[in-house]
Image: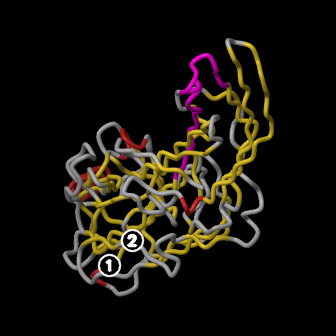
């Protein structure tokens, strides 16, 4: 008799688990996945990018709070790594949506390539205390997802049917510098040629350490919200003294084809003040019929960065997050002028080709 009773109880438990799953006293149903994209905006493109394929990001962090039966105060549901699992973005284990129609879940998601954990992660506050910004750093923050109660299709580039709407935006800036020398043949005498060597160059006055403290508000209905703070549009607050170390360029011979002298790197978004300068030292060797006639070393040039214009002939006075700036510099060995193809501004992950040339005094 006892044996048959145990079998009956087991059958009832299996039947119940097949219908629903219970955690923390909540009836749960569909497992939580994520609908993920990366924000793009430029003069030629607005939309979303595939985070995995276009950004080469395959995992990120996400914290969730469940509000049982619509309770004003939420309880932490999970603080997880979400990763691409072949056909969906999902946490390392299954979590389920609350089944009660009044219950919902709020989500805060972020990505830090260096693995630096935020100092604060709350439903309406995401912050990093003072943090060094290194060349390969990449920090992304997704719009906060509020009052979610089921997977939904939001972004078309995520490769799955739906999930928590998670639209990331880059919180850092990318810059790079290319240089070339032109003309290398004297326009008035083809027998006279020039060789130009970049002896040294550096970018001075750039803040490379700061704090990021973001806040947002519950919109009161299902959806997403942007983050803000008093330091917008930069969002970062620079740490005193963190602009003391110059960013060094790669020295070497310059030809008529642009050479990368500062590989694309991350910097902290900031105002480009008059203290941010590009300091260049170069040499010019003059030859006539292949014979060296003169060598001039240690030719100095200083470019105040906020005087450089973009392709719309507007001076760039800000390095903004989610934006990439490509500086193209030409050294004229004849006039010893520094010419610039004005900064090509683009979204972090896209670009455009229009350029023109101006002279910086």
> Comparing marks 2 and 1, which lies closer to the viewer?
1
Q: Secondary structure at mark 1?
A: helix
Alpha carbons under labels 2 and 1: distance apart: 10 Å
Is residue 8 left or right of 145 when viewed as pictured?
left
Measured as percent of width and height from the top left, residue 122 is found at 49, 75
Instruction: Rate crowding at label 1 as few (under 14), some (14 to 19) or many (20 or more) other CA atoms within 10 Å.
Output: many
Identify the residue position indicated by label 2 in the image: 24
- Asked if one can make out residue 1 in the rendered structure from this viewpoint, the answer is no
Identify which residue is drawn at 55% across, 49% down: 113
* Residue closest to the far bottom: 72
Residue 300, above or below 123: above
Q: Give the image quarter of residue 85.
A: top left
Identify which residue is drawn at 62% across, 57% down: 116
Is residue 248 left or right of 38 when viewed as pictured?
right
Magenta segment: 174-194
Instruction: Rate crowding at label 2 as few (under 14), some (14 to 19) or many (20 or more) other CA atoms within 10 Å.
Output: few
How many marks are shown on the rendered structure? 2
- Asked if one can make out residue 282 in the rendered structure from this viewpoint, the answer is yes
Measured as percent of width and height from the top left, residue 3 is found at 31, 50
For the C terminus, which image quadrant? bottom right
Where residue 168 is drawn, which disc sits there? none
Q: Give the image quarter of residue 184.
A: top right
Identify the residue position indicated by label 1 in the image: 68
């Amino acid at each position: 008799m006892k044996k048959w009773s145990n079998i009956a109880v087991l059958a009832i438990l299996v039947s119940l688990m097949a219908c629903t799953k219970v955690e923390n006293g909540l009836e749960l149903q569909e497992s939580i996945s994520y609908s993920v994209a990366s924000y793009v905006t430029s003069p030629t493109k607005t939309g979303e990018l595939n985070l995995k394929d276009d950004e080469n990001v395959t995992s990120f962090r996400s914290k969730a709070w469940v509000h049982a039966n619509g309770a004003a105060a939420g309880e932490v549901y999970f603080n997880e790594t979400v990763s691409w699992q072949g056909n969906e973005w999902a946490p390392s284990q299954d979590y389920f949506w609350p089944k009660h129609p009044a219950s919902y879940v709020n989500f805060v998601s972020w990505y830090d390539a260096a693995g630096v954990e935020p100092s604060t992660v709350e439903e309406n506050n995401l912050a990093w205390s003072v943090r060094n910004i290194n060349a390969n750093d990449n920090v992304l923050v997704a719009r906060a997802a509020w009052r979610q109660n089921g997977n939904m299709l939001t972004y078309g580039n995520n490769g799955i049917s739906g999930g928590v709407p998670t639209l990331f935006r880059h919180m850092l800036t990318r810059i790079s510098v290319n240089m070339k020398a032109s003309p290398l043949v004297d326009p008035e005498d083809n027998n006279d040629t020039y060789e130009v060597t970049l002896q040294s160059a550096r970018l001075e006055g750039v803040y490379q350490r700061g704090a990021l403290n973001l806040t947002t508000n519950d919109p009161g209905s299902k959806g997403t919200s942007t983050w803000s703070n008093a330091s917008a549009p930069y969002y970062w607050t620079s740490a005193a003294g963190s602009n003391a170390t110059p960013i060094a360029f790669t020295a070497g011979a310059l030809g008529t084809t642009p050479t990368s002298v500062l590989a694309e790197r991350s910097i902290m978004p900031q105002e480009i003040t008059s203290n941010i300068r590009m300091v260049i030292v170069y040499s010019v060797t003059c030859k006539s019929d292949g014979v060296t006639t003169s060598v001039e070393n240690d030719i100095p040039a200083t470019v105040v960065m906020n005087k450089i214009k973009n392709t719309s002939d507007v001076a760039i006075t800000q390095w903004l997050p989610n934006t990439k700036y490509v500086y193209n510099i030409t050294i004229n060995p004849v006039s010893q002028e520094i010419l610039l193809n004005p900064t090509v501004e683009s979204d972090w992950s896209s670009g455009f080709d229009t350029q023109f040339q101006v002279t910086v005094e």
